Image: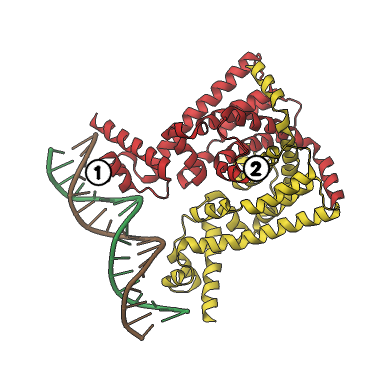
Chain colours: A yellow, B red, C brown, D green
Amino acid sequence: MASDQTRTAILRAAERLYADRGFADVTLRDIVAEAGVNLAAVNYHFGSKDELITELFVTRSIATNRERLAELKAAEAAGGGRAPIDAVLRALVAPTLRGCFGPEGERSDAARFMIRASVEAVAPIRKIKNREVDHLRKFAAAMQRAMPELPEVEIYWGLHFALAMAHHTIRDSERLQKLSEGQCDLDDVEAIVDRVVNAAVLALQSGTKLGETKARSRRAN
Amino acid sequence: MASDQTRTAILRAAERLYADRGFADVTLRDIVAEAGVNLAAVNYHFGSKDELITELFVTRSIATNRERLAELKAAEAAGGGRAPIDAVLRALVAPTLRGCFGPEGERSDAARFMIRASVEAVAPIRKIKNREVDHLRKFAAAMQRAMPELPEVEIYWGLHFALAMAHHTIRDSERLQKLSEGQCDLDDVEAIVDRVVNAAVLALQSGTKLGETKARSRRAN
DNA sequence: GTCTATACTCCGATAGAC
DNA sequence: GTCTATCGGAGTATAGAC
């Protein structure tokens, strides 16, 4: 059981240091010093630095995905197997956003770690995100139930754009703050969620009107 | 003038190798071998690996920003100092998207390098992107001229979401392909541009209707 | 001014003793 | 399971040749 203590100590120290200083600035030697364990223990317990990062990210990712699905199930149950489109999109983006935003001082190591994971996009984390497709398919299906008349391809674009706005808000919140000179309030998580959901719902319906805008744009040139 | 040859050889080799294999897998020793120059030449001409990457990215970035501004000026000139909102947003996202997409086989080293820069988000490139605020402010101003009745804060959110959709489409095109099983066509650049612009225009107007959607969502829960 | 050879520091990984 | 010692390879710094 001393094994588990060492393992856990490494995980906690790594999460905190990565959250504080980012992936690029933290070495395994920093982590083991913080955890009070030996350097070789990392490779013994995790195999490699990348696999340590993978385990940290997967753990948090699974928790977020669980929340997402729970919200989706609840919304669909309330609607008798079919949730309105904004509720589906809310279930998709809200858990991620809630996990990252909120009053800056109160952010947990886990929250700040996930922000770093979005911003720095290190190799092991990119690999995992590319395997998220199966999970996303469940939301695509729910979106189709919500809008059965919409062409399937529009569903995928809409889902894609919804994630785009959510993740980009996490990743580039600093630039948005600077650009707006503080006018965009990033401390009110629920307001951000409303904003993203709202924009995503409209974006979802925009694909079917592509001909009109194209014509208007061409006329302007 | 031998100086310029060495410098240029390093830049070309670096851009090509980074485009082919990504930042994480390419070392300075790979680059100097490809360029046929000595290892120390990199530090002599650029100072550090990060500054080499910075120079590559800044060069391409300036070119893209020039295209963006040219399109914006043209659109505003055609409208007598005021362009329609979709033309402004098109000027913002089209040059970036055109530079990255198109038939996969025909992509230049520069295009593939910029895709890598978006996907891997390495430190020196993140720093530059955070300094792009001044450039974006010109588009915020043009957006305000196009929609003078819209609250300023909505302009910033709209600009933010437009960039979100454009960049996320570049960054996660692979996942979108997999999710849609090839239904989302990423070879037709202009269609992607139309789609992003269209969604961004609608997203821009969504912020003012926040109260309504919130009420609808709450009712659904 | 340019370029080269070489050495230095630090990283992640591993073999083997305990 | 844990630790020591060490490895190859990374980016960097510098002395000196041209």
Instruction: From the viewer's perspective, tell me whether residue A118 is left or right of residue A159.
Output: left
Kind of residue at disc 2 = His
Which residue in the structure is indicated by mark 2?
A: A160
Residue A218: quadrant of the picture: top right
Q: Subunit of mark 1?
A: B
Please rate how many residues cluster around mark 1, counting C-alpha atoms within 10 Å: few if below 14, some from 14 to 19, many from 20: few
Residue B203, image x, y percentages: 72, 35
**Dot 2 lies on which element?**
helix
Image position of B127 with respect to A95: above or below: above
Residue A188 shows up from this direction: no
Residue, x 25% and y 41% (percent of image)?
A: B37
Q: Nearer the viewer, residue B48 or A210?
A: A210
Which residue in the structure is indicated by mark 1?
A: B38
Image position of B140 with respect to A152: above or below: above
Kind of residue at disc 1 = Asn
Instruction: From the viewer's perspective, tell me whether residue A166 is left or right of residue B118.
Output: right
Residue, x 65% and y 42% (percent of image)?
A: A160
**Front label number (2 vs 1):** 2
Q: Subunit of mark 2?
A: A
User: Can marks 2 and 1 be said to lie on one chain?
Assistant: no
Residue A43, image x, y percentages: 44, 69
**Dot 1 lies on which element?**
loop
User: Disc 2 to disc 1, how far (Cα)?
Assistant: 45 Å
